[in-house]
Image (tube, grey):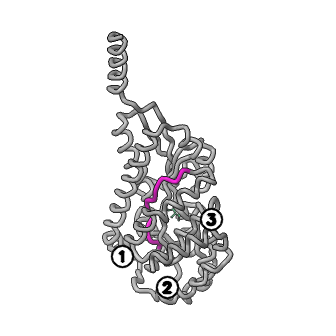
Amino acid sequence: MRKTSLILLLISVMFLSQNVFADIRIKLGVVTKPGSAQNIVADKFKELIEKRSDNKITVKIYHSKSIGNETEILQQIQMNTIQMGIITSGPFDTFDSIARVIDYPFLFKDNEQADQVLDGPLGKEILKSLESSGFKGLCFSENGFRNLTNSKRPVKTPDDISGLKIRVMASKLHKTIWQTLGANPTPMPWPIYTELEQGVIDGQENPLWVMEVYKFYEIQKYMTLTRHVYSAHIDVASLTWWKSLDQKTQELIEKSVYEAAVFQRTDNRSKNAARLALLKDKGMTIESSPDIGAFRTKVSHLKDMDLFKDPKVQDLLVRILKTVN
Ligand code: EAX
């Protein structure tokens, strides 16, 4: 009896002293190139999880569209050929219309509001909802507040936008926003440098880091600080894969990706002032006080449109609007 207990004790000590994580190879997809917001989250997550699991869990990052655009990466995550992704909230629109609530125009006043909502119970509802499309929603990192750029003319009011050919993401909401503002929106997957350079489109809208990392200052003369949409990333895993993991592994992934997200948000925000200076220096003409009131008025009825008629989506939007106003 004593001998058996001793053996059992020895076995458990041996087991515990070994790393408890199974060997796991995670394929993670981002559409953007190194240095981009999505890649900063991915790189940090890789660093944290490999260290914390003693390299039992490893991450291979597929970037720069090597496995397709954001919609295609999401499809591969649904099928579990790719296990994780750091994906802009916009293209989730096609998979679950609840995601368009995040991209509602002029929803968040500032970063603090965005964090408060997305890190809190309302954000959790969005993450939970994604399960019905085969995604395990983990947390939110950020692209940031989106600003308009174009090659044609300075833009201060919605009237100045009239007829501009603006590239938009694969999102019904984004297309509607730009239609409503009087532009000619053209959905197109990322990246879009060549299309801007060749004049297939006149403009686009993205956070400041994009203009720097993708060198849009070379081909877009005018920028307007519209901050019309707060663009999140939804950091997701394949639900099929997620269900196959033990709880300890799930917890380590959740903790590490959330820390990577918080790290990236802070990093992104701390760089914006320097980015603006750089873009000016590179010759962009920047309109920093556009008539935001006029922009807001133009899009204020969007919440009553068909886009938000699904009761679940409408209900969440109304509750978020109450929280932020
Ligand atoms: O981060 O397609 C887009 O405009 C996204 O913002 C893209 O992922 C760049």
> On the image, numbered disc 2 is attached to which residue?
155
Give the distance between the C-alpha atoms of the residues marked 2 and 1, in whole angstroms.
16 Å
* Label 2: few (<14), some (14–19) or many (≥20) C-alpha neighbours in 10 Å: many
* Label 3: few (<14), some (14–19) or many (≥20) C-alpha neighbours in 10 Å: many
Q: Are marks 1 and 3 in contact (CB under 8 Å)?
A: no
> Looking at the picture, how far across and down is residue 81, in whole percent?
59, 41
Determine whether the residue tagged by mark 1 lies in a helix, strand or loop. helix
Looking at the image, which residue is at 42% across and 77% down?
A: 109
- Quadrant of residue 317 in the image? bottom right
> On the image, numbered disc 1 is attached to which residue?
280
User: Between disc 2 and disc 1, whose residue precedes?
Assistant: 2
> Looking at the picture, how far across and down is residue 245, in whole percent?
51, 38
Q: Is residue 251 left or right of residue 69?
A: left
Residue 169 showing in the rendered view: yes
In the image, which residues are magenta? 136-146
> On the image, numbered disc 3 is attached to which residue?
97
Looking at the image, which residue is at 59% across and 65% down?
A: 98
